[in-house]
Image: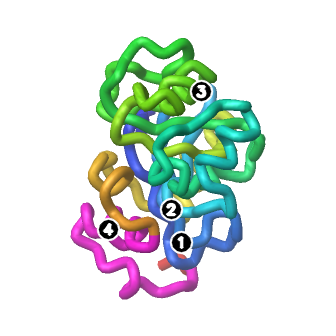
């Protein structure tokens, strides 16, 4: 099995699952046991300041407090994930050597509230998960495209443009692909 860790999963237009229709998912873990990813182009109604208030953390930067929180996926939507670059040394970081890091410990949020957190960074609630062999089956059924992740899309591309931009990494205009599935 070839790992797709540090890759994007780009939902095909015919994706039937409303949780993933027109999404881009950053895979932070993919091995024989399954996969875990964070959807990077769906927002919640919450701002980062709301999360910090729930955790009783003061946030001095009003601009950062307005940053939208992403809906990272349908699994454990109350669990937080911080996608970031740089600033190693947090308690629970997936693949700390990867260009895009995913940290799930409270210490990173505390650092962000103090203005000492990593930049750039985005916060997501929930994740997408696949059991052993499940993602491979979905890829074989043409539910997803995959390509190496590009941090620019995660951190600098407007949310509403991320699906098209990720497909563009493959030279594809995703809006030109039929929105129905078939087999030849």
Mark 1–mark 4 Cα distance, whole angstroms, equals 12 Å
Residue 80 picture quarter: top right
Pointers 2 and 1 in contact (C-beta within 8 Å): yes
Q: Is residue 118 left or right of residue 130?
A: left
Crowding near pointer 1: few (<14 within 10 Å), some, many (20+)? many
Residue at image location 56% in from the left, 25% down from the top:
110
Q: Which residues are magenta?
A: 160-181
Q: Are marks 4 and 3 in contact (CB under 8 Å)?
A: no
SS label for mark 4: helix
Answer yes or no: do the residues labelled 4 and 2 have beta carbons within 8 Å?
no
Q: Earlier in the sequence, mark 1 or mark 4?
A: 1
Classify residue 17 by image quadrant: bottom right
Query: Which residue is the site of mark 4?
Result: 165
**Cα distance in 3D space between marks 2 and 1:** 9 Å
Q: Would residue 164 be found to the left or right of residue 133 on screen?
A: left
Residue at image point 33% right, 20% down: 97
Mark 4 or 2, nearer chain start:
2
* Circle 2 or circle 1, nearest the eye: 2
Q: Which of marks 1 and 2 precedes in the sequence?
A: 1
Location of mark 1 (residue): 22
Apparent side of residue 44 relative to residue 40 in the rendered image (left or right): right
Q: Position of residue 30 (x, y in %)?
A: 51, 33
Q: Secondary structure at mark 3?
A: loop
């Amino acid at each position: 099995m070839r790992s797709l860790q540090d890759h994007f999963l780009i939902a095909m237009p015919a994706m039937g699952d409303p949780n993933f229709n027109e999404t881009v998912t950053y895979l932070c873990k993919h091995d024989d046991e399954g996969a875990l990813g964070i959807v990077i182009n769906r927002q919640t109604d919450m701002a980062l300041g709301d999360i910090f208030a729930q955790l009783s953390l003061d946030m001095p930067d009003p601009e950062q407090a307005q940053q939208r929180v992403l809906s990272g996926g349908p699994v454990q939507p109350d669990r937080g994930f911080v996608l970031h670059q740089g600033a190693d040394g947090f308690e629970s970081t997936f693949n700390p050597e990867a260009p895009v890091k995913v940290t799930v410990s409270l210490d990173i949020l505390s650092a962000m509230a103090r203005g000492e957190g990593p930049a750039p960074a985005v916060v997501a609630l929930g994740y997408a998960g696949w059991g052993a062999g499940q993602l491979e089956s979905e890829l074989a059924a043409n539910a997803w495209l995959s390509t190496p992740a590009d941090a620019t899309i995660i951190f600098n591309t407007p949310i509403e443009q991320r699906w098209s931009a990720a497909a563009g990494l493959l030279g594809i205009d995703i809006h030109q692909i039929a929105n129905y599935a078939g087999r030849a």
